[in-house]
Image (cartoon, grey):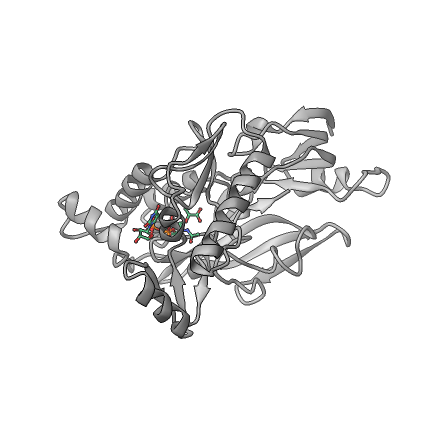
Amino acid sequence: MQIQENISLKPLNSFGIDVRARYFSAFDDIDQLEEILSPGRQWPASPLILGGGSNILFTKDVEGLVLKNNIKGIAVIHEDAEHVYVKAGAGENWHQFVQYCIGRNWAGLENLSLIPGNVGASPMQNIGAYGVELRDVFLDLEAFHIGEKRICTFTNFDCEFGYRDSVFKKKYKDQFVIINVTFRLRKRPILHTSYGSLEQELDRMGVTQPDIRSVAQAVINIRSSKLPDPKKIGNAGSFFKNPEVALPVFEALKNRFPGIVGYPLDNGNVKLAAGWLIEQCGWKGYRKGDAGCHDRQALVLVNYGNARGADILQLSQEIQASVLQQFSVTLNTEVNIF
Ligand code: EPU
């Protein structure tokens, strides 16, 4: 197993932040992972596992070991009249996997097209877009327990999925390496097209009878028009979560700010569009040095070239402070900060 020393992580994180890893290695299977983590080897700290690096902001060098998960493979493990059960290696690129499934008429992932990152990260934060979340199509996953050196299976229930949340961001943070994920996809699609901009885009495309291909294309069109391509401008998608407030709080805010955007939730609360709050505070399109707030989606912070993680972090804190001051609403980060 080759261990590299002092390598730049710039090509390995979608923000394009130039920090260094003291030690770095990649693994293609569990045996290689076990070998790197074997008791004979000593590392300064517990390893940092990188997938696609598309949901992390590095603010400092990593003094320990960074491990890149390159576990590949896609296989149908079971089929019944309604469903296909597809297992994908954690190191598979997410969007390529989505396209692979759409190409075989397996439905369920089309709304999740073009999300950056790898399959292994998808359950960590229960990725979601245009009315669909990962948990809607997730069957189970296998993960390697770093401390106990054994493989565990997590069902949908075990993952405790929430809005951009799971056990892997909370009680099991940094304890497991996700090895593969199994999805339950439909042979006969149930399309989700009611998300506002999705309906509009399908109309614009002249689609009257949508199928999984046209829905995927509509999602790709919307994402490409609003969200910066990480290959061109460093970013990690939405930097903050959309905050949830109680209904009376929303009503009071609505009285003061009639244009406020909020969506009622099943639990009686209201989810606010953080992008709207940030835009109202004047941040949309703001740039200081190479750190900025995207000019077409204020929820996305960007690195125009050589921003440091600390510059992006500082900008994010200034945004949080102004939203708190103007609306008395706390914004929490969606991106993991290292
Ligand atoms: N809005 C503004 N100004 C902005 C951005 C948004 O006023 O600068 C308003 C829009 O007018 C719209 C509302 O906010 O009414 C919602 O905007 P959008 O549809 O772009 O979605 P979002 O709530 O900002 C969430 C996800 C995205 C996901 C989209 C579509 C979070 C944190 N973000 O964004 O996910 O693509 O919905 O489903 O939930 C990601 O997680 O990285 C991500 C990009």
Nearer to me, 26 or 298: 298
The answer to whether 220 is drawn above or below residue 261 in the figure is: above
Location of the C terminus by quadrant is top right
Left or right of 67? Residue 192 is left
Q: Residue at x 49, y 28 (%)?
A: 290
Q: Residue at x 33, y 53 (%)?
A: 130
Q: Position of residue 214 (x, y in %)?
A: 24, 45
Q: Residue at x 39, y 37 (%)?
A: 294
Q: Residue at x 36, y 43 (%)?
A: 297
Left or right of 87? Residue 284 is left
Left or right of 37? Residue 331 is left
Location of the N terminus by quadrant is top right
The answer to whether 185 is drawn above or below residue 115 in the figure is: below
Q: Position of residue 194 (x, y in %)?
A: 25, 59
Residue 250 is drawn in which quadrant? bottom left
Residue 60 is drawn in which quadrant? top right
Nearer to me, 316 or 107: 316
The residue furthest right is 40
Q: Position of residue 163 (x, y in %)?
A: 47, 60
Nearer to me, 235 or 23: 235
Residue 190 is drawn in which quadrant? bottom left
